[in-house]
Image (cartoon, rainbow, N blue to C red):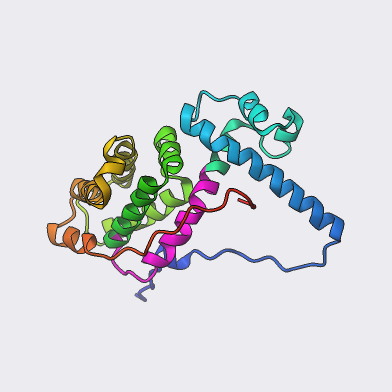
Amino acid sequence: MQKRATKHFYMSYQPKLKPQRAVHPRTVSGQAQKAKTRAAIIQVAIPIFAHHGPDIPVIDDFVKAAGVSRGTFYNYFQTTRDLLEASMAYISDELIETIIPAVAHEPNPVIRLATAARLFYRKARLDPVFRAFFSSVSSVGNLAARHAHSDLEEAIEKGLIKVTDIELAEAIAFGVMVFALRSSKVEAGGQERAREVVRAILNALGVEPGLIDRAMRVALPPPTPPASPSGNP
């Protein structure tokens, strides 16, 4: 039986590029304006979701904050849930771009997971809006969740964690992280608090102590300054 090579999510994820076609200048200008309006709605939505959570805000809250009409809002988002998904993608893009190269060549899924979790927590520690948003919506973001799911599946397959139910493993990893972000110790605890949180996740998953220590010794890339609020999400 031929053994199939396994590529983890970080290595296999590649954006699909569409063929370029000549575009009329007016079309380019119109697209740029649409992108700007969409970004403006998302930018005002992030602190609203961060403060109120995902369920309380209504469309009028975002319309008023962005200074647009309901019709304009519906040109971009049909529901507040659509806007929430777009906001999660917008606020996490910079972080995901940092995580991918940091773990892309690491063959051990547990170390990839731990490194990504440490980077996520560090971002939350240094960026209060990021922290408030994800703790309020009780999520780590769709793309981050997909990365973690891939790593957890591979870790289960290789027998590196004792929790073999993928849904339970995800509940442990995401649940500990989200609740940790709600703690008053996030900023004061610094890097040591981040290690405690990630150690708690790995211990709960049943990772061997030696592998946990290896994961904690991985050097993280330097943090990047927050992205500019302008531009296309």
Depth check: 60 or 74 in front?
Answer: 60
Q: Is residue 153 visible?
A: no
Quadrant location of residue 39? Answer: top right
Residue for point 80% across, 57% down: 28
Q: Magenta segment: does it hold 205?
A: no
Which quarter of the rendering shows the N terminus?
A: bottom left
Location of residue 216 in the rendering, given as x and y in whole percent from the top left corner: 22, 59
Q: Main secondary structure of the magenta part?
A: helix
Quadrant location of residue 29? Answer: bottom right
Count of numbered tags: 0
Q: Is residue 12 visible?
A: yes
Depth check: 190 or 130 in front?
Answer: 190
Q: Along the horizontal axis of the image, is 16 left or right of 9? A: right
Q: Along the horizontal axis of the image, is 127 left or right of 216? A: right
Quadrant location of residue 131? Answer: top left
Residue for point 65% across, 24% down: 60
Location of residue 86 in the rendering, given as x and y in whole percent from the top left corner: 57, 43
Location of residue 2 in the rendering, given as x and y in whole percent from the top left corner: 37, 76
- Identify whether 207 is placed above or below 72: below
**Residue at the far bottom in the pictured view:** 2
Depth check: 86 or 150 in front?
Answer: 86
**Residue at the far left in the pictured view:** 209
Residue for point 21% across, 64% down: 217
- Identify whether 75 is placed above or below 51: below
- Identify whether 131 is placed above or below 99: above
Q: Magenta segment: does it hold 103?
A: yes
Q: Along the horizontal axis of the image, is 79 left or right of 53? A: right
Instruction: Tell me which segment is drawn in magenta.
Output: 88-109
Location of residue 49 in the rendering, given as x and y in whole percent from the top left corner: 51, 32
